Image (spheres, helix red, strand yellow):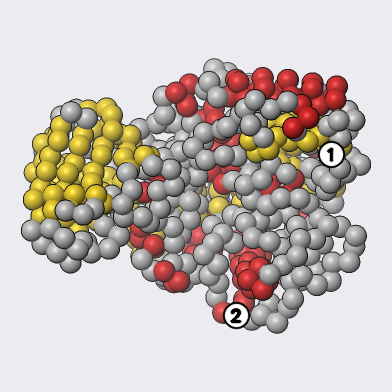
């Protein structure tokens, strides 16, 4: 009976968009997200240089949320999408530095839908933990084809890092936790995998999370797409009165490559939508297109201020298009403020699934807005921040409520005059600071900002961060990468840097392998600290980039795993560490 009631509610809620959902079958769900594609990186949003016919047509057949916001960077956005919660509640506080692992006590969108009978698949970027128990396959996805860390060609994605300027081509990816070699361009591969999953799951409800890593750096794209843009000047032709940041020659060349990558995405989205038609399930499928934050490089961004990493609108406002099933396809715009945290409660509502009752869900269902409710939700505030490692009070931090937005680029002891206040209704480009003119409004927003920050910074999953579990039957061997390493700030490809991993180790005997960025120049000692246990291996070889320590006995341990190579002149942190339990 509960199922029938939910299905009837689903029908009633969506009547204004047409009488779709004629059966009790739950809709299929496809969530498409791109990486570092800004609000202005579509023809539909005013970029006349870009050729995106598929996405432009998709937007016109969709409900468009024109004031939709995400986090300023990728891992926080993705954790909010998966949970309906602010990223700090989930334990995600960075994009690397060991801060991009989502706590395993979170209930993900994939877990909710799987529990309701959905087949679930992730294709592309995950960026919420690369080892057990944080992988997609541990967090509700039946099928996954993914790269590691924050992006292909980054240090954490060690299977593509050494490919350099070919990291997006013929990559080694991870299918259901196992390395597999692929041929072709990454965005094409992820789309092929998504289409295969949809084809196999067409007879049952499915959730497909197609998470492109493009157009994130490195800016690599098939030549035939670059040819479309090689002769354009991306800085020309925007005489519409909106602010436009001057572009250097490098900015222009970067924009050409980004636009080429976006056109490739457009073609791939077209292939996926065509497959829905061929399978005759387009009318049963809800499709969302969005991006994860603003652009990384300087280019057209519809006049907005700031880019990726900024709490100004250029860093956080993104396109969000929802094509509803059957006759719900409509060319409709909704101006009410909405955000990434709303995706999970909205999809749960549309699919007739109850939300978890044992935790705070920060998002709201957008179904009342789909139902024609014009409520502006002026009681609602949206918190945003971005600094490395942990939030810093008032630094690159903002709160938006109604038409007003308070922005802090100041220190912990700032006074109200040190902030900025914008009236977004009359100043959408955030050019005119009203903080001295509207002190009362600013003070009220500051109080709310402080309340939100104080609540989130005390989140249990920040105090007790997730740990990589080593020596379990779920993942053996475990390969630890630099994206999930803590220690010094900004661990990347450096040799001389202090790094460690927070782990939980099962008692046993291990074969341990250490890989280095470059061949070692000197003899020395390989040191592995595991809590109170220290193991050392005397290395007499030079010009080697791998050291093996066989048959290392480790006790059951929860704590820090600290490896380093000590020579006469250097202390070197490994590029990755593999631990295989053999007994």
What secondary structure is marked by label 2?
helix
Identified at 44% across, 57% down, the residue is 154
529 displayed left or right of 373: left
Q: Taking 483 as reference, is 91 above or below it? A: above
Q: Is residue 15 left or right of residue 557?
A: right
Residues at badges 2 and 1 in contact (C-beta under 8 Å)? no
Residue linked to disc 2: 224
Residue 145 visible, this angle: no
**Callout 2 environment at 10 Å: few (<14), some (14 to 19), or many (20+)?**
few
Based on the displayed image, in which of its 4 quarters is residue 44 positioned?
Answer: bottom right
- Residue 271, how many percent across, how many down? 62, 65
Q: Which mark is residue 433?
A: 1
Q: Where does residue 163 sit, x and y in percent of width and height?
A: 38, 69
What separation in Å lies between label 2 and label 1 (alpha carbons)? 45 Å
Q: Is residue 85 visible?
A: yes
The residue located at (84%, 46%) in the rendering is 431
The residue positioned 60% from the left and 20% from the top of the image is 455
Residue toward you, 393 or 465? 393
Q: Which numbered disc, 2 or 1, marks the residue closer to the eye?
A: 1
Nearest the viewer among 114 and 491 is 491
Describe the element under mark 1 as helix, strand or loop: loop
Residue 184: where, in percent of width, then height? 46, 71
């Amino acid at each position: 009976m509960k199922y029938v009631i939910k299905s009837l509610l689903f029908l009633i809620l969506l009547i204004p968009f047409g009488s779709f959902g004629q059966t009790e079958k739950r809709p299929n769900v496809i969530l498409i997200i791109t990486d570092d594609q800004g609000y202005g990186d579509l023809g539909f949003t005013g970029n006349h240089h870009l050729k995106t016919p598929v996405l432009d047509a998709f937007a016109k057949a969709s409900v468009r949320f024109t004031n939709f916001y995400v986090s300023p960077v990728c891992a926080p956005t993705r954790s909010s999408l998966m949970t309906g919660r602010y990223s700090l509640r989930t334990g995600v506080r960075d994009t690397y530095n060991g801060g991009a692992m989502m706590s395993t006590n979170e209930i993900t969108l994939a877990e909710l839908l799987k529990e309701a009978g959905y087949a679930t698949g992730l294709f592309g970027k995950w960026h919420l933990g690369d080892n057990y128990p944080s992988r997609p396959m541990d967090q509700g996805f039946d099928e996954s084809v993914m790269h590691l860390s924050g992006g292909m060609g980054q240090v954490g994605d060690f299977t593509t890092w050494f490919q350099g300027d070919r990291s997006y081509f013929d990559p080694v990816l991870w299918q259901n936790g196992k390395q597999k070699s692929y041929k072709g361009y990454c965005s094409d591969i992820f789309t092929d995998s998504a289409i295969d999953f949809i084809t196999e799951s067409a007879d049952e409800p499915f959730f497909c999370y197609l998470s492109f890593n493009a157009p994130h750096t490195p800016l690599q794209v098939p030549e035939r797409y670059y040819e479309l843009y090689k002769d354009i000047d991306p800085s020309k032709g925007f005489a519409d009165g909106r602010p436009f940041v001057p572009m250097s020659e490098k900015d222009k060349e970067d924009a050409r490559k980004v636009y080429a990558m976006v056109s490739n995405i457009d073609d791939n989205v077209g292939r996926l939508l065509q497959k829905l038609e061929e399978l005759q399930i387009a009318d049963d499928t809800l499709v969302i297109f969005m991006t994860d934050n603003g652009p990384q490089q300087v280019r057209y961004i519809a006049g907005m201020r700031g880019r990726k990493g900024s709490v100004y609108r250029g860093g956080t406002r993104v396109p969000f298009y929802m094509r509803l099933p059957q006759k719900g396809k409509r060319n409709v715009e909704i101006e009410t403020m909405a955000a990434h945290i709303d995706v999970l409660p909205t999809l749960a509502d549309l699919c007739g699934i109850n939300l978890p009752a044992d935790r705070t869900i920060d998002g709201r269902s957008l179904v009342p807005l789909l139902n024609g409710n014009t409520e502006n939700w002026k009681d609602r505030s949206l918190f945003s921040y971005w600094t490395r490692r942990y939030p810093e009070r008032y630094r690159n931090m903002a709160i938006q409520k109604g038409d007003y937005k308070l922005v802090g680029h100041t220190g912990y002891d700032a006074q109200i005059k040190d902030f900025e206040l914008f009236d977004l209704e009359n100043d959408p480009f955030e050019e005119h600071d009203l903080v001295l003119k509207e002190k009362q409004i600013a003070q009220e927003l500051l109080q709310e900002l402080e309340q939100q920050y104080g609540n989130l910074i005390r989140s249990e999953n920040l105090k007790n961060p997730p740990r990589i579990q080593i020596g379990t039957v779920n993942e053996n061997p475990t390969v630890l990468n630099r994206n999930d390493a803590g220690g010094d700030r900004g661990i990347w490809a450096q040799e001389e840097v202090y790094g460690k991993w927070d782990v939980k180790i099962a008692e046993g005997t291990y074969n341990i392998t250490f890989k280095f960025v470059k061949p070692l120049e000197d003899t020395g000692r390989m040191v592995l600290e595991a809590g109170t246990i220290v193991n050392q291996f005397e290395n007499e070889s030079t010009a080697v980039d791998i050291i093996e320590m066989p048959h290392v006995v480790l006790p059951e341990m929860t704590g820090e795993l600290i490896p380093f190579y000590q020579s006469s002149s250097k202390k070197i942190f490994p590029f990755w560490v593999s631990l295989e339990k053999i007994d």
